[in-house]
Amino acid sequence: MSEGRIDIVREPGHPGVARWHAVTLPGLVAGVAGLRPVVPFECGPPPPAGTLELSLHVEPPWRRRGIGSRLLAAAGAHAAGRRLVAEVAAGSAGESFGVRHGFRRTGSWGHDLLTYCDVHHAWLGELVDVEHQGYRLRHWTGDPCGATSVEQLLRRPSRPGDAVLSAAEADGDLVAYVLARSDGARPRRARQYGPAVHVGHRGRRLGLWVNAALLKRIRETHPDVEELETRIAHDDPAQLALRRHLGFRPLGRSIRYEITLP
């Protein structure tokens, strides 16, 4: 393969999202890096304000040529003074790359994957149609950038965007939700966050209800999405059982790394 010139090119994108391509002379994309706001809707402590999620991938034939370092430098110059977080597969080249560039390990998760071709859609519809007395479903689609809570999203009008939200309400209060967002690096895959159920409403299968509703909703709003990936803490058997019931299968384990840029 030619060692010809490789340019790092900024790609125009959506508001709040930045992306760079490593482009070779024949016009091939050898690698891509992206920055986007961290989704603040997961359980656990919220990330510090201004935290960005980094995604970075170099095609295998082009690795060990400094392309990843150049992409990271471009993203770092754009995000100077901010914290970056990145998730990489355990034991992967991405993990060793992050360590070499000063990232520190801050957590780990298991990942599950659901493939839509394995879902029985009539059964999914039956799960959604089950009556939950006193509760009602709400949906939202659009761009979550700038929102810090699910309540803020539900107050926005739905519009085209890369995020889908399904929620359950009781007496006007939010009691359960799950959100999915398309994966910029893999457009046919979406990433799911949740479901989360308010402690006073657990034991009523609301998590299963909103998750089934989300799966059905994604097929209507984003028919190009073929897979749904989600992560789970190793000490959450209830969440794991829900995922297995819906058809999620183990995908692997990821490590979370962070760095605060100078």
Image: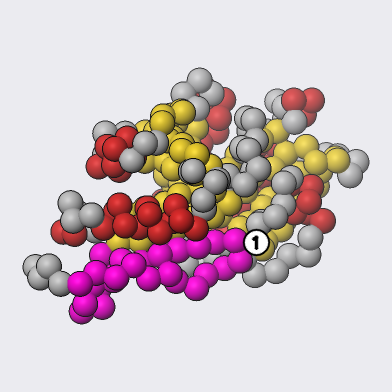
The range drawn in magenta is 5-30
Residue 163 picture location, percent across and down: 61, 58
The answer to which image quadrant residue 57 occupies is: bottom left
The answer to which image quadrant residue 90 occupies is: top left
Is 131 inside the magenta-drawn segment? Answer: no
In this rendered view, identify the residue nearer to me: 139 or 27. 27
- How many neighbours does mark 1 have within 10 angstroms: few (below 14), some (14-19), or many (20 or more)? many
Is 8 inside the magenta-drawn segment? Answer: yes
Question: Label 1's element?
Answer: loop
Residue 139 picture location, percent across and down: 72, 56
- Tell me if I can see residue 120 in this picture: no
- Tell me if I can see residue 79 in this picture: yes
In this rendered view, identify the residue nearer to me: 210 or 66. 66
In this rendered view, identify the residue nearer to me: 198 or 260. 260
232 is higher (above) or lower (below) than 62: above
**Residue at x-position 75% and y-position 31%:** 198
In this rendered view, identify the residue nearer to me: 44 or 26. 26
Q: For the image shown, how many numbered marks are present on the structure?
A: 1
Tell me the amino acid under the disc marked 1. Asp
**Residue at x-position 48% and y-position 43%:** 261
194 is higher (above) or lower (below) than 217: above
**Residue at x-position 20% and y-position 79%:** 26
Q: Check the image and name the residue furthest to the left.
A: 1
**Residue at x-position 72% and y-position 52%:** 147
Q: Check the image and name the residue furthest to the bottom.
A: 26
Identify the residue position indicated by label 1 in the image. Answer: 143
